[in-house]
Amino acid sequence: MRALGKKTWVIAEGYIPEYGTGKEPEFTSHETACILNTSNEDAKVELTIYFSDKDPVGPYKVTVEAQRTKHLRFNDLKDPAPVPLGTDYACVIESSIPVVVQHTRLDSRQAENALLTTIAYSE
């Protein structure tokens, strides 16, 4: 299968609520980058997080195996530093081969959960 997508993606709007309601981990408030790799080769992916009031953090390095998808929760990113809760941020995702990126947020701060999803901007 050919590699669909682009090598650079941007999520300009990011925010992980500090708390949530409901059963964990299913209803933990979170942000996710859903990364699809349709090619026959593993994608080496690096994420850099940008903030309004401090220097960027990254790269966070992940591999998306050939012909697989990875739903990467920003809450789970720890190295080089955890993504802070309750803080506005943006993210640049760079891949060694073309991939497709979709952004999703689950906000479970109230019993009536909100789910937002959008395709990221590609370059």
Image (cartoon, rainbow, N blue to C red):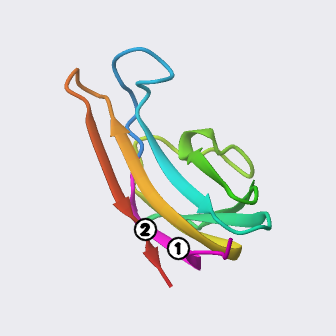
Q: Which residue does the image show at 65% across and 75% down from the upper left?
A: 3
Q: Quick one: label 2 or label 1, which is nearer the N terminus?
A: 1
Residue 77 vs residue 5: left or right?
right
Residue 105 vs residue 24: left or right?
left
Q: Position of residue 48 (x, y in %)?
A: 62, 66
Secondary structure under tag 2 reads loop
Q: Which residue does the image show at 19% across and 26% down from the upper left?
A: 112
Residue 78, quarter of picture: top right
Is residue 3 in the magenta section? Answer: yes
Q: Position of residue 73 (x, y in %)?
A: 55, 43
Q: In front: 49, or 73?
A: 73
Q: Which residue does the image show at 30% across and 48% down from the upper left?
A: 116
Kindly identify the amino acid type of the residue bearing the numbered disc 1.
Trp
Q: What stretch is highlighted in magenta?
A: 1-15
Marks 2 and 1 in Cβ contact (< 8 Å): yes
Q: Residue furthest top?
A: 23
Residue 109, quarter of picture: top left
Which residue in the protein does label 1 denote?
9
Image: 35 above or below 110: below
Query: What crowding class fits label 1: few (fewer than 14 Cα within 10 Å), some (14-19), or many (20 or more)?
Result: many
Q: In front: 73, or 78?
A: 73
Q: In front: 43, or 82?
A: 43
Gap in Å between the C-alphas at discs 2 and 1?
6 Å
Kindly identify the amino acid type of the residue bearing the numbered disc 2.
Ala
Q: Residue furthest right?
A: 41
